[in-house]
């Protein structure tokens, strides 16, 4: 039986759940994400989405997949995988087309960053496509540093890489300055 880990935090009447990639609620996320990428880039994107084995998005391999559910249905989600010992790589960030412009993607990012930091990662790395200006804007607005020339035509760059350094949590038993 598949387990779903639910956190008590709610925003916008949305519940955050951690699920395995094989969970039935993940299917709509990946189907719509694949369709959108295929439409924007003119080629089948499902191969790119399935390029990484599902195991890479499990805690045993340093990863995580989470969904935001509204009335039990997925409205947004995302995942991270181990990039290196200190870096989590964000993948599959998605908001259902009927639920955009509600701050859900920002919530997904915040949840993924929090989880990555709790698992000991100190840096987030991600790429987005040159035909995804909404994603590019989101990452810039949420403190990600572009690792490319933002003045260049995105089509000449290809995947647009970003990074964000996560705060180091205070050591247990040590006082912090206010």
Image (spheres, rainbow, N blue to C red):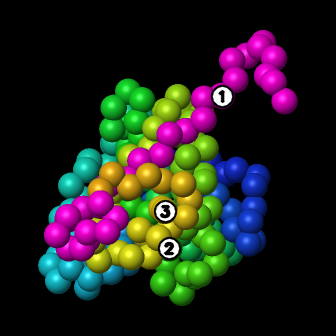
Up/down of 112 relative to 178, above or below: below
User: How far separated are the C-alphas under marks 2 and 1?
Assistant: 29 Å
Asked if residue 20 lies left or right of residue 101, the reply is left
Nearest to N terminus: mark 2 or mark 1: 2
Residue at the right extreme of this rendering: 178
Q: Are marks 2 and 1 in contact (CB under 8 Å)?
A: no
Quarter of the image with the C terminus is top right
Residue at the top extreme of this rendering: 173
- Closer to the camera in the image, 100 or 148: 148
Nearest to N terminus: mark 3 or mark 2: 2
Residue sitting at 42 percent across and 40 percent down? 88
x, y percent for residue 127: 32, 57
| Residue topped by disc 2 | 95
Nearest to N terminus: mark 1 or mark 3: 3
| Residue topped by disc 1 | 169
Mark 1: secondary structure: loop
Q: Nearer the viewer, mark 3 or mark 2?
A: 3
Q: Nearer the viewer, mark 2 or mark 1?
A: 1
Q: Badge 3: few (under 14), some or many (20 or more) residues near its Cα, within 10 Å?
A: few
Up/down of 87 relative to 111, above or below: above
Residue sitting at 48 percent across and 46 percent down? 164
Q: Are marks 3 and 2 in contact (CB under 8 Å)?
A: no
Q: Are marks 1 and 3 in contact (CB under 8 Å)?
A: no
Q: Nearer the viewer, mark 1 or mark 3?
A: 3
Q: Quadrant of residue 129?
A: bottom left
x, y percent for residue 68: 60, 64
Residue 174 magenta? yes
- Closer to the camera in the image, 167 or 105: 167
Region of the chain picked out in magenta, as a range? 149-178
| Residue topped by disc 3 | 140
User: How far separated are the C-alphas under marks 3 and 2?
Assistant: 18 Å
């Amino acid at each position: 039986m598949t387990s779903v880990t639910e956190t008590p935090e709610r925003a916008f009447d949305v519940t955050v759940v951690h699920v395995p990639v094989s969970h039935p609620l993940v299917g709509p996320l990946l189907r719509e994400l694949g369709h959108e990428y295929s439409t924007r880039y003119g080629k089948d994107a499902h191969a790119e989405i399935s390029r990484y084995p599902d195991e890479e998005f499990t805690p045993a391999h340093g990863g995580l997949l989470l969904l935001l559910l509204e009335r039990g249905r997925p409205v947004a989600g995302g995942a991270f995988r181990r990039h290196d010992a200190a870096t989590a790589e964000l993948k599959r960030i998605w908001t259902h087309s009927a639920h955009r412009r509600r701050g859900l993607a920002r919530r997904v990012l915040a949840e993924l960053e929090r989880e990555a930091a709790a698992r000991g990662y100190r840096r987030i790395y991600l790429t987005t496509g040159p035909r995804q200006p909404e994603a590019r804007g989101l990452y810039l607005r949420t403190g990600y540093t572009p690792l490319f020339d933002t003045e260049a035509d995105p089509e000449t760059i290809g995947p647009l890489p970003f990074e964000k350094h996560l705060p180091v949590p205070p050591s247990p038993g040590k006082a912090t300055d206010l």
